[in-house]
């Protein structure tokens, strides 16, 4: 490996995992990193539902790679779509047919929504996985309100009935955030539309919300959502999504013009094209050092990886797993360069948490899952997410101030973000320097 020009590392995906990997290598003169991402920015997914409900602008949660790595000459961000990976040659082909080869490849391309072949879902449901999705959800909500305000009879046709599919953290968090929007904000904007005309219905095939949490947390989440007027339809699946309704497995039909899909995810498309062994949800199975079996110089990290972990099976798809695995892959690459060797991945478990809406949060901390609800849970959520954001390049103090205010008080929304016909304007920036406008998405 050429020590002089630096070991070449090609990273596909600039989310939590890819950015963490590049950051550890950024100060290494011995490493030359190419960071490929189709957007050219990192999106902070834990706050997507705030963008979807007009609380934050998209730009608030997008961190431009060129800004994040400015002045770090060993990292070159490339905004491009990777379409193929050659494991033997350790090369990545881009959409324009350019090929970038390295001594190492790190696959960190994340996940995508899984519609589980539900009829009509990929066509009519609104997923909530990336910034584009969140903007589409927001525009749809605002347009439906504007339409219903102009023609109140549309309410009877389901114009203000919102169906959320999935009772995991995404479904629970977006239901809570939607309820805050519907109760705290929309009555001021549309005083002639009755709040009672709005319905939020959460559907999940399981019988509990937040399945990986304890029974107490299941009950807490259900109580908090019901208190906010969210109707729970548990133990039944959505079998069909159409333009103006959904059909449930129990035979019922719900008139709706917005179905938000938080029903599951699977590995990013490129996982299937790489010709590597795939496990649950199409994720790529990795060795304990996070490399691919038979390809020691190819690492797979974050949501796209199936990382086995002791008795717990596989690690969950979380920002902290992604960030730590990205950093770990970088350490193992440096271990190769230094000759100090590799270590098996060790995950520092911070627990699991969800913010259900204003004044409601749940957290189960650490490997022993100490359970917290309400304000203490929110404090835990804040700590973990402030750390994730600071690694993304954000100004943490501004985030903490916003989050505390958001949690405690009914929140004003800026007129720009509530107007479906206006171009989205930035409200606040946590980025240490003003990010460029995110590209096409
Ligand atoms: C709505 C929502 C809420 C969440 N809330 C939380 C939370 O509160 N706490 C928490 O810990 N986790 C949360 N998560 C999970 C967390 O966001 C993920 O675990 C984390 O983003 C995974 O990081 P990653 O780097 O593996 O993938 P990502 O962050 O998804 O990054 C993957 C990157 O790869 C790029 N990419 C993909 N394919 C290609 C390609 N072919 N070519 C070029 N670029 C490509 C994408 O543009 C993207 O930037 C949430 C997820 C969602 C969807």
Image (cartoon, rainbow, N blue to C red):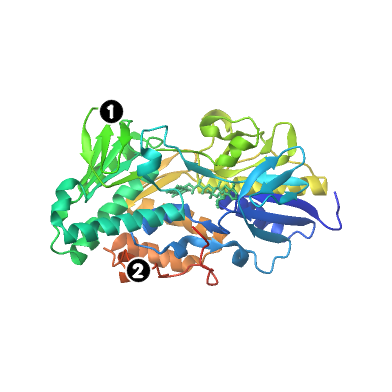
Residue 213 falls in image quadrant = top left
- Residue at image coords 56%, 35%: 283
Residue under pointer 2: 422
- Asked whether residue 262 is in view, the answer is no
Q: Residue at x 42, y 52 (%)?
A: 133
Mark 2 → mark 1, Cα distance in angstroms:
39 Å
Residue positioned most to the front? 96
The numbered mark, 2 or 1, whose residue comes first in the sequence reads 1
Establish if 224 lies above or below 50.
above
Residue indicated by mark 1: 249
Residue 61, position as x, y percentages in the image: 47, 61
Q: Position of residue 154 (x, y in %)?
A: 17, 52
Q: Secondary structure at mark 1?
A: loop
Q: Would you say 374 lies left or right of 71 here?
A: left
Residue 102 visible, this orientation: yes
Q: Which quadrant holds residue 365?
A: top left
């Amino acid at each position: 490996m050429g020590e002089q020009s630096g070991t070449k590392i090609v990273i596909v995906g600039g989310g939590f995992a890819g950015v963490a990997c590049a950051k550890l290598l950024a100060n290494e003169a011995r490493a030359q990193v190419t960071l490929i991402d189709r957007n050219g920015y990192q999106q902070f997914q834990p706050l997507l539902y705030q963008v979807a409900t007009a609380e934050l602008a998209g730009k608030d949660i997008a961190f431009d790679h060129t800004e994040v790595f400015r002045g770090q000459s060993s990292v070159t961000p490339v905004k491009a779509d990777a379409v193929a990976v050659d494991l033997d040659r350790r090369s990545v082909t881009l959409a324009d047919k350019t090929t970038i080869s390295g001594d190492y490849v790190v696959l960190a391309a994340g996940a995508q929504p899984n519609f589980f072949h539900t009829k009509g879902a990929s066509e009519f449901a609104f997923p909530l996985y990336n910034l584009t999705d969140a903007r589409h959800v927001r525009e749809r909500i605002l347009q439906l309100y504007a339409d219903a305000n102009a023609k109140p009879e549309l309410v009877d046709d389901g114009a203000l009935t919102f169906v959320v599919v999935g009772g995991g953290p995404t479904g629970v968090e977006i239901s809570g955030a939607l309820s805050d929007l519907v109760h705290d904000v929309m009555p001021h904007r549309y005083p002639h539309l009755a709040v009672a005309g709005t319905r939020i219905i959460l559907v999940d095939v399981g019988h509990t919300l937040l399945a990986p949490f304890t029974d107490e947390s299941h009950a807490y989440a259900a109580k908090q959502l019901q208190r906010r007027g969210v109707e729970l339809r548990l133990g039944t699946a959505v079998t069909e999504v159409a333009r103006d309704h959904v059909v449930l497995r129990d035979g019922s039909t719900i008139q709706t013009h917005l179905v938000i899909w938080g029903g599951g995810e699977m590995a990013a498309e490129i996982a299937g094209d790489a010709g590597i062994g795939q496990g649950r949800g199409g994720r790529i199975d990795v060795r304990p050092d996070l490399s691919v079996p038979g390809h020691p110089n190819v690492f797979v990290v974050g949501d796209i990886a199936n990382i086995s972990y002791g008795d717990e099976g596989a690690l969950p798809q979380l920002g902290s797993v992604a960030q730590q695995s990205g950093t770990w892959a970088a350490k193992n690459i440096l271990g190769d360069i230094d000759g100090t060797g590799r270590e098996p991945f060790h995950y520092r478990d911070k627990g699991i948490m969800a913010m259900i809406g204003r004044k409601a949060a749940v957290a189960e901390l650490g490997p022993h899952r100490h359970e917290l609800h309400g304000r203490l849970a929110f404090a835990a959520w804040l700590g973990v997410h402030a750390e994730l954001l600071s690694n993304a390049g954000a100004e943490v103090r501004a985030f903490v101030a916003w989050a505390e205010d958001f949690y405690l008080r009914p929140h004003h929304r800026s007129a720009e973000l509530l107007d479906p016909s206006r171009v989205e304007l930035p409200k606040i920036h946590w980025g240490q320097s003003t990010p460029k406008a995110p590209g096409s998405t």
